[in-house]
Amino acid sequence: MKRILGILLALIVMLACVGCGGGDKPADKPADKPAAPAETEQKSDKVGALMPIGLDEEGYKRWTKDIAKNEGQPAGYAAPNTVVFFNDIKSMVLALESKQIDRFATSKIVGNYLVAHNDKLKLIDDNFKPILGYSMAMQEKDEAQIEEINKAIQAMKDDGTLAKIVKENVSDLAGNDPVATPIPVIDGAETIKVAVTGDRPAMDCILANGTPAGFNIAFLSELGKRINKNFEIIDVDSGARSAALASGQVDALFWVVGTYDKDGKALPYPLDSMEGVATSIPYLMDSRVGVALK
């Protein structure tokens, strides 16, 4: 009887040790295995973008899908779960830093400028399609003026002036603030009011002292001489560009965005969709990038 009790006691001790993991081999119970990640779970994907003219969230998603299908854009940008529009670049950067969005899309000029001035940011998906083309826009009644601007833009391309302005006001900045190029005043000449927003640095930039600067201002300085017109700079919120033109607050807009292939051919899905306006040929072409937190 004592022997039987001794054997039972030994068995109880052995079972207790196994239950505490004290044996040579860990307990292989299904409940102790870590839960496998759900492969079907879809990660939230919020993409920020400056408010385009004439596109809502669904329109923007269709735009990205069309590009992915027809132009070979990376699939990761083809169908974001949510598009969050912003009226200015500052708000979009703050939203990224506070993780309200996962990333945002912009032009390479802007992306390079932001990364050079903010060590929290990095470029992603460099040079994905399509190419962005920046044009000026005026009301249809001013189409003759747009044709004059077109001739001046083409002449600036042909004689190398436009490439020089890009080099001095974009390529050679190396992280420095853009220069505020003075715009000449021509006595007796007609004045064209042009909207600037400061939301495409270093292309369209407002310095800390409130002075407009960057490529657009340098371009206007040269354009005014060529078409014999004065330009008055009007500070306008990015999201109010179209309304400012329609109401007559301004006569012309900068950076109306079209899309182009690598050969410069216009694609049938512009980013800014405007009716009742005349649009110039592009004065600047730039690739697209994504911006995310490091």
Image: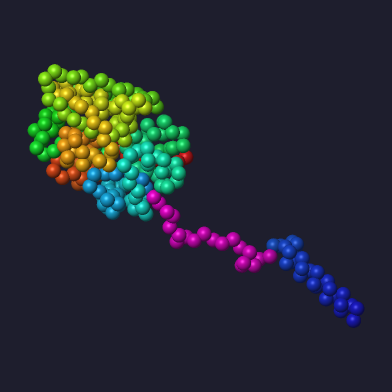
Q: Answer with the quarter of the image where residue 217 lies.
A: top left
Give above or below for 233 relative to 237.
Answer: above
Q: Is residue 262 visible?
A: no
Q: Nearer the viewer, residue 139 or 250?
A: 250
Q: Identify which residue is drawn at 42% across, 31% down.
A: 117
Most foreground residue, 226 or 40: 226
| Residue 41 magenta-highlighted | yes
Q: How many marks?
A: 0
The span shown in magenta is 27-46
Residue 71 at x, y = what percent?
27, 47
Name the main secondary structure of what is drawn in magenta: loop
For residue 136, above or below residue 183: below
Q: Is residue 277 magenta?
A: no
Q: Position of residue 34 (x, y in %)?
A: 59, 61
Q: Position of residue 248 (x, y in %)?
A: 16, 37
Residue 200 horizontal side relative to residue 159, left or right = right
Which residue lies at the image location 32% right of the left edge and 27% below the top edge? 210
Foreground residue among 62 and 52: 52
